[in-house]
Image: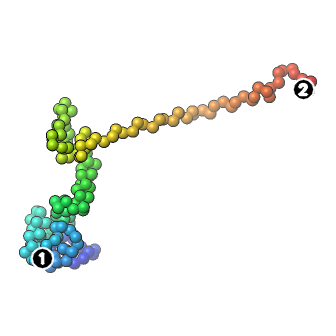
Amino acid sequence: GGVGRDFKDDKRIKEAEFLQGYAGVGRHGFVALEGLDSKKAAKRAFKSMDGNGGGLVLMDEWCAFLKDAEVKAGTEVGRLLSAEAGARRLARGPTPEAVADPTEAPEAPPANGPPAFATEEAPIGGARAPPPPPPLPQAPPVPLVPPPAPSPPATARKPAGARMGG
């Protein structure tokens, strides 16, 4: 707590701290912080941030509060944060519960449009990704033993027993 950030910062906000400084946070452009114009509004915001009801807002609770409001409002920041979270989920891969039984047929997309989530078979927007390019041709193997030296040209050889000059 406390004002500003320093080496003693515990990355937590107590309700009393928030009520002292709420007026300054509304000017930073986050949707969740707009309209903090009274202590009553600040108390409501604090309770909504304090997800576990512990009386402290931890850094992850603060970030989640701001992110959720931006995503819900559909702001540019919200779209970026939402896309970033989706990319992290894709990078982690499917959970064991999400892995489908290969003997089951895949679910068909809804009749009124593409599915609400992207899969390899049905990405968002309904368009399928193009197939991957064919593999590049492989270079011929490099011999481990050097090839034999070429023989001298035929014109440079003289038959055995031939005389020089005529």
Residue 30: image location, x then y, percent: 20, 68
Q: CA distance from mark 2 to mark 1?
A: 114 Å
Q: Quadrant of the C terminus?
A: top right
Residue 17 visible in the snapshot? no
Specify whether 53 is left or right of 160. Answer: left
Quadrant of residue 163 in the image? top right
The type of residue carrying mark 1 is Asp
For disc 1, the marked residue is 37
**Residue lying at 22% horizontally and 56% vertically, measured from the top left:** 82
Say the numbered circle drawn on residue 164: 2
Q: Quadrant of the N terminus?
A: bottom left
Query: Nearest the camera: 90 or 117?
Result: 117
**Tags 2 and 1 touching, CB below 8 Å:** no
The type of residue carrying mark 2 is Met
Specify whether 54 is left or right of 25. Answer: left
> In the displayed structure, would residue 60 be above or below residue 104?
below
> In the displayed structure, would residue 37 be above or below residue 70?
below
Mark 1 is surrounded, within 10 Å at the Cα level, by few (under 14), some (14 to 19) or many (20 or more) other residues, namely few
Quadrant of residue 110 in the image? top left
